[in-house]
Image (cartoon, rainbow, N blue to C red):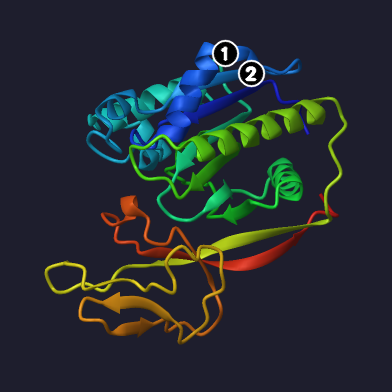
Amino acid sequence: MNKINRVAIVGGTHGNEFTGAYLIKKFEQIPALIQRPSFETLTLLGNPLAFAAGKRYIDKDLNRCFFIENLLDCTLSSYEDIRAKAIYQILGQTSNSQVDLIIDLHSTTANMGLSIILGSHHPLLLQLAAYLSSINPEVKVCYTQPEKGSNFLRSLCELGLVIEVGPVAQGVLNAEWFQKTEELIYSVLNYLQRYNQGSIPQTNNTLTYYQYVGAIDYPRNEHGEIQAMIHPQLQFQDYEPLNPGEPIFLTLDGKAIAYEGTSTVYPVFINEAAYYEKGIAMCLTEKQLYSLQNL
């Protein structure tokens, strides 16, 4: 595989996720923290107007603005569409400063702990994820969907990953998660330095990850109003097994609603505040083992 020459760390893609935004501020003040001998590390505040306003976005979710056809569409004129085009020019494949790997920093109100979210099975990403989970038992690895046609910022680069931490309230700077995210970033950069030197750390032969299989919305009435909340037994149980027949919602008048699936799943992003508007009460994953022996 090719050497890593340039890495980008992006924070504040969502303006009210302060962990990543303030880490970018710190790295801009002390750039030596993220520089390594064999590659350059760039920093980028993803959505500066939303960050200044303490809002997730100004007009629309920036992290849903990176379909290539939208990036090339000059008629799209929302603030986030314009910002996405600017980021594409900075980080994308047409840029003189094209990056080899993107780390997009996010925080969540759900109990996701330290999550690494991947969108491809690129060998380097899988080996990196296996290494991070081996040195830190708090690290969980999620795999969403193939990056072909993705509208996420991380899809601007073949080697794109998200660090998602929480629970952290929106618009709040939490010291614990700030420090844990910072240490995880250093672990990523140190791994890439060793990768460039040809001395990749040994890890387990298998990677445990959680494969996205779908999402569930809250029960709603004909007006779209929520009629039930996350059941207390499920709240904060991200990455824990959910079996058919177990309660997932509690109606406003106190009746439990059971999970009607036919197999055990592992919910993530349970009761994520930002997903209410997207019609998502939780995402469902299946627990998988991936062999690294043939990489």
Number of other residues with Cα within 10 Å of mark 2, as a class: few under 14, some 14 to 19, many 20 or more: some
Gap in Å between the C-alphas at discs 1 and 2? 6 Å
Q: In this figure, which residue is indicated by the disc labeled 2?
A: 33
Task: Judge the density around disc 1: few (<14), some (14-19), many (≥20) Cα neighbours within 10 Å.
Answer: few
Q: Position of residue 176 (x, y in %)?
A: 53, 39
- Give how far across and how far down residue 195 sits, in percent: 80, 31
Residue 49: give its label.
none
Picture residue at 54% right of the left edge, 19% below the top = 27
Q: 28 or 95, which lies in front?
A: 28
Residue 161: x percent and y percent? Answer: 57, 40
Task: Tell me the residue at 28%/84% (across/down).
Answer: 255
Q: How many labels does the image show?
A: 2
Residue 64, given in percent of the width and then of the height, sits at 37, 43
- Please give the name of the residue rendered at 43% of the width and 28% of the height, measured from the top-left corner: 21
Quadrant in which residue 53 is drawn = top left
Q: Is mark 2 on a helix, strand or loop?
A: helix
Is there CB contact under 8 Å for labels 1 and 2? yes
Compared across the picture, whether 4 is left or right of 181 comes to: right
Q: In which quarter of the image is the N terminus?
A: top right
Give the residue number, with chain letter if any, for mark 1: 30
Q: Is residue 157 visible?
A: no
Residue at 71%, 47% in the rendered image: 136
Work out whether 263 lies above or below 193: below
For the residue pair 16 and 287, the one nearer the viewer reads as 16
Question: In which image quadrant can residue 263 be found?
Answer: bottom right
Label 1 residue SS? loop
Image position of 98 (left or right of 77): right
Q: What residue type is labelled 2?
A: Leu
Question: At label 1, which amino acid type do we have?
Answer: Ile
Instruction: Please tell me whether residue 115 is drawn above or below residue 189 in the rendered image.
Output: below
Relative to residue 139, is residue 62 depicted above or below?
above
